[in-house]
Amino acid sequence: MIREGQTAPDFSLPGVEGGEPGIYELHRAVGDGNAVLLEVWAVSMDSIYASAAYADEFDLPMALLGDGGSAAEYYGVRSEEWEGHYGAPKRAVFLLGADWEIRFAWSTDDAFARTDPSPVERIGAAVEAVALGADTDVTVDYEGQFG
């Protein structure tokens, strides 16, 4: 897995946000300054059609991208096999700065792990370092709508 301090690999993936399909290119997000504002992309091996239905069902406010395995491979989080799925991305979280440096990296082989604190809660200090003044007071409710 790629580690903190390393340079983030670029990638381009199809995705959907707000029901609108598009191509999401990391270099454009960083170049446009959006990454500095903490743009969140969720990546899975699902098609953008399945992702659109999932985002709609759970009212997700971020882009959901479909990865055939290339981005997961670049970041070192591609599973050989998981419950009959070959090449599926592992659960992982990455935060990169405008300089492409990985500021936070986390992954797990257990797709159902309920870590405490969660990776979203752990990332707070790294977000504050990248985006001064960011509100990082978050909690994760594993028993909520996804429980």
Image: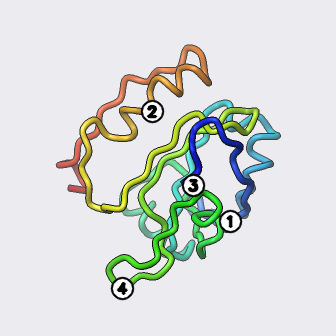
Whole-angstrom CA distance, mark 4 to mark 2, is 31 Å
Whole-angstrom CA distance, mark 1 to mark 4, is 23 Å
Q: Is 23 positioned to the left or the right of 72 in the image? A: right
Where in the figure is residue 46, as x and y percent of width and height? 50, 74
Name the amino acid type tagged 2: Ile
Determine which residue is flagged by label 4. 84
- Crowding at mark 4 (Cα within 10 Å: few <14, some 14-19, many 20+): few
Vertical position of residue 115 compared to residue 73: above or below: above
Q: Is 111 positioned to the left or the right of 143 in the image? A: right
The reply to whether discs 2 and 1 touch (Cβ–Cβ < 8 Å) is no
Pointer 1 or 3: first along the chain: 1
The reply to whether discs 1 and 3 touch (Cβ–Cβ < 8 Å) is no
Name the amino acid type tagged 1: Leu
Determine which residue is flagged by label 3. 63
Q: Nearer the viewer, mark 1 or mark 3?
A: 1
Q: Nearer the viewer, mark 3 or mark 4?
A: 4
Determine which residue is flagged by label 1. 13
Determine which residue is flagged by label 2. 123
